[in-house]
């Protein structure tokens, strides 16, 4: 049985090479928001024949096919996560680089209220918070 991302790729008609399968498995198994270099290190630990160029091409293909989503959290690295219809926001620790996913109904409601007050129906949003851990 393949990874979640591999199954999505197959459903969308993408050709699945062994290297793409490995990259999809690495992304599906990630609990963080890895950049291309991190994906490459993890994938090449599984298959030493995977090149950084293959990872870049595959990541671009997966992004263009809406299989993964790219984020820019302001740290100079494009980060990636599995594309999902489940909405969540992000909090980034600017010291450690850790990205925490969260949902908050009060924030969601407030955004709707702000849009409505300004005469808009909210159709989407992206919320990114940046902070440092309180010791």
Image (tube, grey):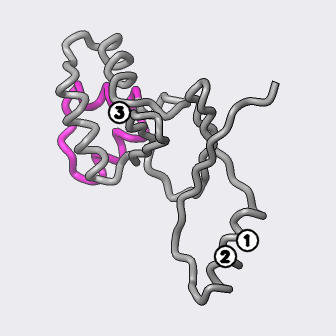
Label for residue 24?
Answer: 3
**In the rendered image, the vertical position of residue 32 relative to residue 64, given as above or below:** above
Residue marked by disc 2:
112
Q: Are marks 1 and 3 in contact (CB under 8 Å)?
A: no
Residue at the (29%, 44%) spot, across then down: 62
Residue at x-position 39% and y-position 30%: 35
Q: First in sequence, mark 1 or 3: give its number.
A: 3
Image height of 37 relative to 122, above or below: above
Mark 2–mark 3 CB contact (< 8 Å): no
- Name the mark nearer the viewer: 1 or 3: 1
Give yes or no for residue 3 being in the magenta stretch.
Answer: yes
The answer to whether the residues at label 1 and label 2 have Cβ atoms under 8 Å apart is: yes
Residue on which disc 1 sits: 109
State the residue in front, 30 or 92.
92
Q: Residue furthest right?
A: 135
Q: CA distance from mark 1 to mark 2?
A: 5 Å
Task: For the N terminus, give its image quadrant.
Answer: top left
Tell me where residue 72 appears, x and y as whole percent: 43, 44
Classify residue 73 as left or right of residue 131. Answer: left
Foreground label between 2 and 3: 2
What is the quadrant of residue 80 in the picture?
top left
Q: Which comes sooner in the sequence, label 2 or label 3?
A: 3
Q: Secondary structure at mark 2?
A: helix
Question: In this picture, which residue range is highlighted in magenta?
Answer: 1-26
Label 1 CA crowd tier, 10 Å (few <14, some 14–19, many 20+): few
């Amino acid at each position: 049985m393949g990874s979640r991302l591999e199954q999505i790729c197959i459903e969308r008609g993408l050709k699945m090479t062994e290297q793409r399968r490995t990259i999809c498995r690495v992304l599906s198994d990630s609990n963080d928001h890895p950049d291309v270099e991190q994906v490459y290190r993890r994938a090449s630990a599984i298959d030493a024949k995977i090149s950084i160029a293959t990872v870049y091409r595959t990541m671009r293909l997966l992004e263009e096919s809406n299989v993964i989503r790219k984020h820019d959290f302001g740290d100079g690295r494009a980060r990636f996560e599995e594309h999902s219809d489940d909405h969540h926001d992000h909090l980034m620790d600017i010291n450690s680089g850790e990205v925490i996913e969260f949902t908050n109904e009060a924030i969601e409601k407030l955004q709707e209220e702000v849009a409505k007050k300004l005469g808009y129906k909210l159709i989407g949003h992206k919320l990114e918070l940046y902070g440092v851990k309180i010791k």
